[in-house]
Image (tube, rainbow, N blue to C red):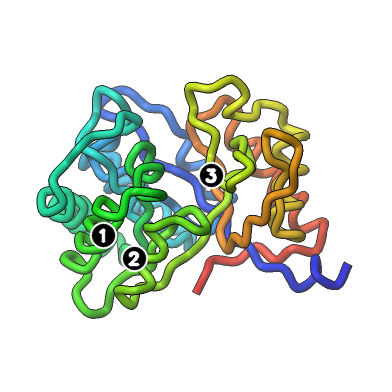
């Protein structure tokens, strides 16, 4: 029980995932639960008006703003892997961070971290060039001060971020299936996304308190995560997020943004 009492976890959610008249995430409801907001920056979702509104809501509620950068893939929602040259990818990452920073500062806040989205997130787990390009983009946008980078534990993205002097923040997913190697089961495979609320809540508590998860083959996999992602694009996401937070706090886990 002692380990549960001393556990800390940040709750993040993907927000601003809409475009024009189309909306996907219940941003206002989720911002009443999470401690960090991954805001879509226009490449997989999000437009200037949405980015501005989410930043204003996040600032009002004291939620940290993060840039959720992506491949330039509105049609595929950023879930299609693309072979983007490293220099071009670095520039596109910096561009997205810079765009969000304008709205964050106008709201009285700032961009506090960076998290890749979708295919870019998964690609940077094992692709050294793409991982280095994302880190170069963060450096280009943030300069010497840098910004923390969220990624999968053991990923090349976090390794490259740490090598560049950036804070590398390991992240876990309560509603995604894991392989025995600690990577996410691809979304196209059966059972890749968990839909049972009770299962998601139970996994969230175990991840935060015990730093472990059961893989798709039944084996235990360590997940030394400091942040837990609650996907905003699933049905009933806001209600599930509230359940997760209540369960975490009920188990003695302190919900707090990473430093």
Say which element carries label 1: helix
Q: 202 and 133: which one is in front?
A: 133
The percent position of residue 2, horizontal first and vertical second, equals 85, 72
CA–CA distance in space, label 2 to label 3: 17 Å
Helix, strand or loop at mark 2: helix
Label 3 secondary element: loop
C-beta proximity under 8 Å, tags 2 and 1: yes
Asked if the residue under mark 1 is in contact with the one under mark 3, i.e. CB atoms within 8 Å, the reply is no
Q: Is residue 103 visible?
A: no
Q: Earlier in the sequence, mark 2 or mark 3?
A: 2
Whether residue 170 appears in this view of the structure is: yes
Residue closest to the eye, 119 or 114 = 119
Q: What residue does disc 1 label? A: 132
Tell me how far mark 2 sits from mark 1, CA to CA. Answer: 6 Å
Can you give x and y, in whole percent of width and height, for residue 204 in the image?
70, 48
Give percent across and percent down for residue 137: 20, 60
Residue identifier under label 3:
183
Disc 2 marks which residue?
Answer: 160
């Amino acid at each position: 029980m002692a380990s549960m009492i001393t556990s800390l976890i940040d709750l993040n959610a993907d927000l601003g995932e809409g475009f024009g008249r189309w909306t996907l995430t219940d941003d206002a409801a989720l911002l009443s639960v999470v401690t960090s907001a991954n805001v879509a920056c226009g490449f997989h979702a999000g437009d200037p008006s949405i980015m501005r509104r989410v930043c204003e809501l996040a600032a009002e509620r004291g939620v940290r703003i993060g840039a959720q950068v992506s491949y330039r893939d509105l049609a595929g929602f950023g879930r299609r892997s693309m072979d983007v040259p490293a220099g071009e990818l670095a520039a596109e990452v910096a561009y997205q961070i810079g765009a969000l920073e304008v709205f964050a500062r106008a709201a009285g806040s700032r961009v506090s971290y960076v998290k890749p989205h979708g295919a870019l997130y998964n690609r940077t787990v094992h692709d050294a060039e793409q991982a280095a390009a994302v880190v170069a983009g963060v450096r280009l946008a943030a300069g010497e001060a840098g910004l923390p980078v969220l990624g999968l534990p053991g990923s090349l993205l976090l390794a490259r971020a740490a090598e560049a002097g950036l804070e590398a923040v390991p992240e876990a997913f309560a509603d995604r299936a894991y392989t025995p190697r600690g990577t996410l089961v691809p979304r196209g495979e059966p059972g890749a996304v968990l839909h049972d609320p009770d299962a998601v809540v139970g996994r969230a508590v175990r991840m935060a308190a015990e730093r472990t998860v059961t893989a798709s083959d039944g084996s235990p996999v360590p997940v030394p995560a400091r942040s837990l992602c609650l996907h905003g694009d699933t049905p009933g996401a806001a209600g599930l997020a509230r359940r997760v937070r209540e369960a975490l706090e009920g188990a003695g886990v302190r919900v707090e943004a990473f430093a």
